[in-house]
Amino acid sequence: MEPLAVSINDTAKALGLGRTSIYAMIADGRLESFKLGRRTLIKAESIRQLVAAQG
């Protein structure tokens, strides 16, 4: 089963970007995130949409 949400670090690795860039994309609304306890997670669908919009 594919994960529904991914950590900031895993998102950065998947996109080949740094953590600061990921946080900037969250602030811009390009990535949809949510908090689960102390962790910030990115919705996997949001990552797919970002990549699809670039191609």
Image (cartoon, helix red, strand yellow):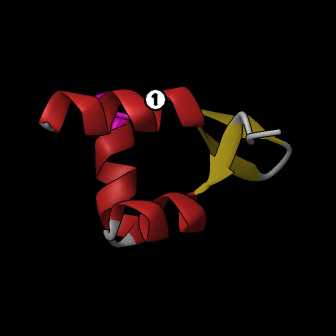
Quadrant (top left/top right/bottom left/bottom right) for the N terminus? top right
Left or right: 15 with respect to 41?
left
Q: Residue at x 57, y 36 (%)?
A: 44
**Tally of numbered discs:** 1
Q: Is residue 48 left or right of residue 28?
A: right
Q: Please determine whether, in this image, residue 9 is positioned above or below residue 42.
A: below
**Mark 1 belongs to which amino acid?**
Ser
Which residues make up the magenta segment? 27-31
Say if the magenta span includes residue 30: yes
Q: Main secondary structure of the magenta part?
A: loop
Answer with the quarter of the image where residue 15 lies: bottom left
In the picture as drawn, the residue positioned furthest to the front comes out as: 1
Classify 10 Å Cα crowding around label 1: few (below 14), some (14-19), many (20 and above): some
Q: Which residue is mark 1?
A: 46
Does residue 10 show up magenta in the picture? no
The residue lying toward the viewer, choosing from 16 and 2, is 2
Q: Residue at x 44, y 65 (%)?
A: 12
User: Residue 20 at x, y = what percent?
Assistant: 34, 66
Q: Report the side of 22 relative to 28 (left or right).
A: right
Q: Image quarter for residue 54?
A: top left
